[in-house]
Amino acid sequence: MAVSDCFRPGTAADRVDGEVPPQVAEPDSPEAFAGVLAHASAERLATVIRGGGTKLSWGRPPDNLDLVVSTTRLTRLIAHRHGDLTATVQAGMTLRDLNVALGAERQWLPIDSAFDHATIGGIVATNDAGPSRHRHGTPRDLIIGITLALTDGRLVKAGGTVVKNVAGYDLGKLMSGSHGTLAGIVDMTFKLVPIPQTSATLVASYADAGALARDVAALDASQIEPAAFDIRSEDGETPLQLKLRVATSPAARDAQIAAARALVSGQATILTDTAERETWQAQIDAPWHGDAAVRLSWLPTKLLHVLETLVEIRRTDRVSVTFVGRVIGTGLARLSGDARGLAAAIQRLRSSDAGNVVLLRGSRELKETVDVWGVPRSSDGAVRSLKRMFDPAGILNAARGPI
């Protein structure tokens, strides 16, 4: 496909945070993808790269939007090297479709997403991760190779196709969480893991945040090896939960779940099969149904302070909060309330022990009241230098951030 054949008029279905682009490009090859970006750079077109469109409301509203570049035609599983536990996949393939394909060899890419249409490229660009992060890390930790389309029309590759070959690995890390501000992701190579034989989840409920924090510390210091280890805080009679999943052989699963149950003081139940799948799906879905979604991080030793801040937000700012988080120190909060209360809640979080607070989803009014990305950081100068190197015309992501 020639570059000129990639373009079509934008429609309401192509909106980015409410803005309809005049043009949409749908390249069907890596070369066409790079050519579209070179054209956009030469014409100084404010450009947003789109995968499944599940996170187009993240970030600042676009200052100006001339072009959306879609990866909807780049959906191939290029290679599954099941003997090496690696796979190479194009950016437009969905996580769901990828894991269905990998499942034929009892393998999977251990990333969780709340969004059925989330693409691999979009997940890497936002470094989106769920409960499986506890054992397997984020997309940044799983990439071993990457191909990029640059705004000068070049295709560049870094990394390899086997886990032991890590040449250029930092380029994959750099693109993870870059939100499409540096280059277009064409394809990626990941290390995979076997699907576990069996699993079970311990769910313990608490009325006291101090008791939950003590149990988290005790479990974290034990010999138990969780596949996922989460907390949940919400309004209601039992506002706090601890969720610990063990995924291994049947005998090891039972032994570790028994050891975990002996360490917790909260009322505990054990879930398997459908009930277990449903509780983790609810954990993944929870942040995305309110008026705003906020990502925050903290030092693991500050968990109790974060939970106390959430109580203060409910009481003082009159905002409903549902919070799900990894005990390693990162999580998402669903906030519901009026714009003034939401803004106050975000500012309260930013003044607390939650060190990095980002507004992912929210109304335009809220985004105009609080900065989406938070206060400037000491690393911003270095990041802006990278932006100038990769995208000298400054066309990518239409000033939506983070750089």
Image (cartoon, rainbow, N blue to C red):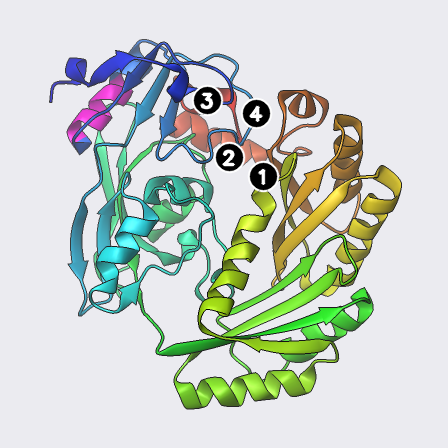
Q: Which residues are magenta?
A: 31-38
Numbered tag placed on residue 16 in the rendering: 3
Q: What is the three-letter code of the residue carrying label 1?
A: Ser
Question: Is residue 202 placed above or below 38 in the rendered structure?
Answer: below
**Res 160 visible:** no
Tell me which residue sits at (45%, 35%) in the image: 179
Q: What is the three-letter code of the residue carrying label 4?
A: Arg
Q: What is the three-letter code of the residue carrying label 2?
A: Val
SS at mark 2?
helix
Numbered tag placed on residue 383 in the rendering: 2
| Horizontal and vertical percent position of residue 98 | 27, 52
Question: Is residue 182 placed above or below 280 in the rendered structure?
Answer: above
Q: Using a 10 Å C-alpha cutoff, classify the residue at mark 4 as few (fewer than 14 neighbours), some (14 to 19) or many (20 or more).
A: many
Which residue is identified by label 1? 379
**Which one is closest to the eye, mark 4 or mark 1?**
4
**Which one is closest to the eye, mark 4 or mark 3?**
3
| Horizontal and vertical percent position of residue 21 | 39, 13
Residue farthest right in this picture: 316
Residues at circles 4 and 2 in contact by the CB criterion of under 8 Å = no
Work out how far the residue at label 4 is from the one at label 3, CA to CA, in angstroms: 10 Å
Q: For the N terminus, which image quadrant?
A: top left
Work out how far the residue at label 2 is from the one at label 3, CA to CA, in angstroms: 24 Å
Instruction: Choose the circle earlier in sequence order: 4 or 1.
Output: 4
Q: Using a 10 Å C-alpha cutoff, classify the residue at mark 1 as few (fewer than 14 neighbours), some (14 to 19) or many (20 or more).
A: few
Residues at circles 4 and 3 in contact by the CB criterion of under 8 Å = no
**Res 306 visible:** yes
Question: Is residue 321 placed above or below 151 in the rendered structure?
Answer: below
| Horizontal and vertical percent position of residue 32 | 18, 25
Judge left or right: residue 97 versus residue 45: left
Instruction: Choose the circle earlier in sequence order: 4 or 3.
Output: 3
